[in-house]
Image: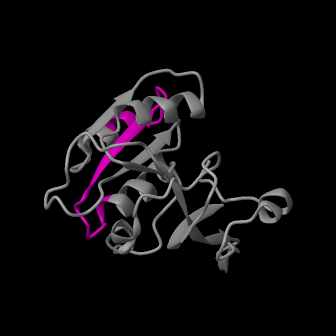
């Protein structure tokens, strides 16, 4: 399953996936106007998925983001691949206590006001996703994207409501790239 972000919708809860607001940004973006985003990728022995994700992140036309990669001590060449990536602001490859431990480690290192999790195997829908997303980040606790799912080489649009409701959260779920 490959989750692809296409458009953002505001939401009201903070407990589940999407782009989470981290708090006040510790450093300003290059032009001082846009909200800064931290893209986080966690990986463990998924070199091919990591390549797909990293290429998608690095191909973003926006430069108003930082990129953090947390690898759980992979033995499949992932560490060496990460070390050669041209645009990673912080990375580490070491054993951890699982995917959520790795995500929390990344959030602690993140400098952005918002974090988006693009785990190994995930990809942005297009190279201009962050250019479209960043101007829309206007202080909400979190935002969720319109997912595009790849199943058996077929692209399928996921469903997200225009307004987040308790009913939706009870009957469905917010996509999360884990």
* Position of residue 12 measured from the top left corner of the image (x, y, whole percent): 62, 58
Q: Which x, y percent locates residue 50?
A: 45, 49
For the view shown, which residue lies furthest in the left direction?
31
In reply to whether residue 55 is colored magenta, the answer given is no
What residue is rendered at 49% in x and 29% in y?
72
88 or 37: which is nearer to us? 37
Rendering quarter of residue 61? bottom left
The front one of 8 and 66 is 8
115 above or below 128?
A: above
Residue 152: image location, x then y, percent: 70, 72
Identify the residue at horizontal 64%, vertical 53% (top origin).
Answer: 13
Q: Residue furthest right?
A: 171
The magenta stretch spans residue 67 = yes
Left or right for 154, reference 37? right
Residue 48 left/right relative to 54: right
Look at 47% across and 35% down and name the residue there. 76
Q: Looking at the picture, tell me which residue is in the foreground, 2 or 129.
A: 129
17 with respect to 70 (left or right): right
| Numbered range of the magenta stretch | 58-80
């Amino acid at each position: 399953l490959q989750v692809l972000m296409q458009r953002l919708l505001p939401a009201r809860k903070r407990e589940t996936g999407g782009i989470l607001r981290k708090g006040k940004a510790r450093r300003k973006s290059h032009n001082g106007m846009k909200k800064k985003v931290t893209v986080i990728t966690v990986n463990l022995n998924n070199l091919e998925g990591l390549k797909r994700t990293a290429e998608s992140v690095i191909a973003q036309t926006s430069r108003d983001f930082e990129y953090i990669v947390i690898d759980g001590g992979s033995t499949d060449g992932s560490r060496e691949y990460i070390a050669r990536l041209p645009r990673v602001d912080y990375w580490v490859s070491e054993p951890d206590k699982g995917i959520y431990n790795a995500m929390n480690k990344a959030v602690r290192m993140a400098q952005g006001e918002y974090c988006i999790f693009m785990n190994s195997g995930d990809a942005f829908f297009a190279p201009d996703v962050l250019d479209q997303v960043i101007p829309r980040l206007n202080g909400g606790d979190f935002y969720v994207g319109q997912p595009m799912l790849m199943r058996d080489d077929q692209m399928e649009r996921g469903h997200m409501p225009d307004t987040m409701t308790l009913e939706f959260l009870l009957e469905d779920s917010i996509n999360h790239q884990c």
